[in-house]
Amino acid sequence: MLKPEVEDGEQSLADPQFRADVLAGLERRPRAIPARWFYDRRGSELFEDITSVPEYYPTRTETAMLEHVCAEVAEVAGRGRAVVEFGSGSSLKTPLLLRCTDPSAYVPIDISGDFLRESSLTLAEAFPGLPVLPFEADFMRPLTLPRAVADTPKLGFFPGSTIGNMIPLMAVDLLRTMRASLGEGAMLLIGMDRIKDEATLVAAYDDAGGVTAAFNRNLLDRINRELAGTIPVDAFAHEARWNDDRARIEMHLVATRDVAFTVDGRPFAIAEGESIHTENSHKYGSRDARILLRSGGWTPIREWTDPDGLFGLYLAEAQAERPAP
């Protein structure tokens, strides 16, 4: 057994939902832990590193697309809306949108508080006249946005194909939650990765430099640190798999030997070859994406893709509910 690296009082400060999700995920079969728990400070930093590896095409593709279509987004959505970004990370793509839409405020939402505040400060310095209102929250749950933007028309921003991390049922629930948080008349600019050849997809989630592998294993480090875990991290290998039936990349942590450990005082054993499923990245065709948006209460009004058809950007509106066509 490894000695848990936990500071005095650190276990007691762990997020109760993190504890519940990890314990439930390790007990179920097949084992699975929600991907949102990747994003402690170190996980957020590693994800930013992933976006710049050669194999990971989504970030550079979507960024180039935003540069190309941003003026049209501003024309359709109108200027002066409050831009609300879900899962803002380091906000690398956000300046492109802010420059062309002339927003009244910017509300970045992220579950990683320290990372959120640092990136918000950087953005506020780049846009000195813009109110930047960082909001530490889990955007998977209904949100009451800051009062300063309560009565302001809103433009939601959800880039990076993060919607693909959720199974379709959860993705629809999230879109409905976003609609409720942003209000009727709001618009949403969202990125969705498209289906393509398996080799390109697997390489994007298993880069040669091992950055994605480190990102995946960091979840185990976090469990050890925050939940008094004794998981032997070196006994788990990162694996990316294409599941054609479900049109998604799956990330797993596969045990390379039989292991026994405890988390929060509870014992667990994982046999060699067994895995912990840590992330999905669903890929959507154009029609699939539009159906998903409509199921979540959003009416697609614009759609763009890059010249190679790798990625899709969609602008949708929260229109008044209609009982029939």
Image (cartoon, helix red, strand yellow):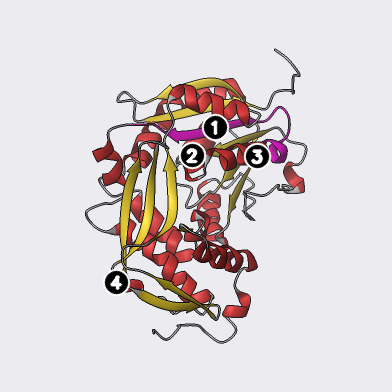
| Quarter occupied by residue 311 | top left
**Where does the magenta region start and end?**
178-195
Residue 189's disc number: 1
Neighbour tally class for label 2: few under 14, some 14-19, many 20 plus, Cα within 10 Å: many
Neighbour tally class for label 1: few under 14, some 14-19, many 20 plus, Cα within 10 Å: many
Residue 191 inside the magenta-drawn segment: yes
Q: Tell me: residue 64, above or below residue 108.
A: above
Q: Tell me: residue 9, above or below residue 56.
A: below
Foreground tag (3 vs 2): 3
Please report the residue visible at 24 percent of the width from the left and 39 percent of the height from the top. Answer: 199
Q: Calculate the distance from the C-alpha at mark 4 to the C-alpha at mark 1.
A: 44 Å
Amino acid carrying mark 4 in the image: Arg
Q: Position of residue 64 (x, y in %)?
A: 36, 33
Please report the residue visible at 73 percent of the width from the left and 29 percent of the height from the top. Answer: 184
Residue under label 2, please give it: 159
Using residue 3 as the reference point, say whether residue 322 is left or right of it: right
Amino acid carrying mark 1 in the image: Leu
Circles 2 and 1, Cβ within 8 Å, touching? The answer is yes
Residue 44's disc number: none
Q: Calculate the distance from the C-alpha at mark 3 to the C-alpha at mark 2.
A: 14 Å
Residue under label 3, please give it: 178
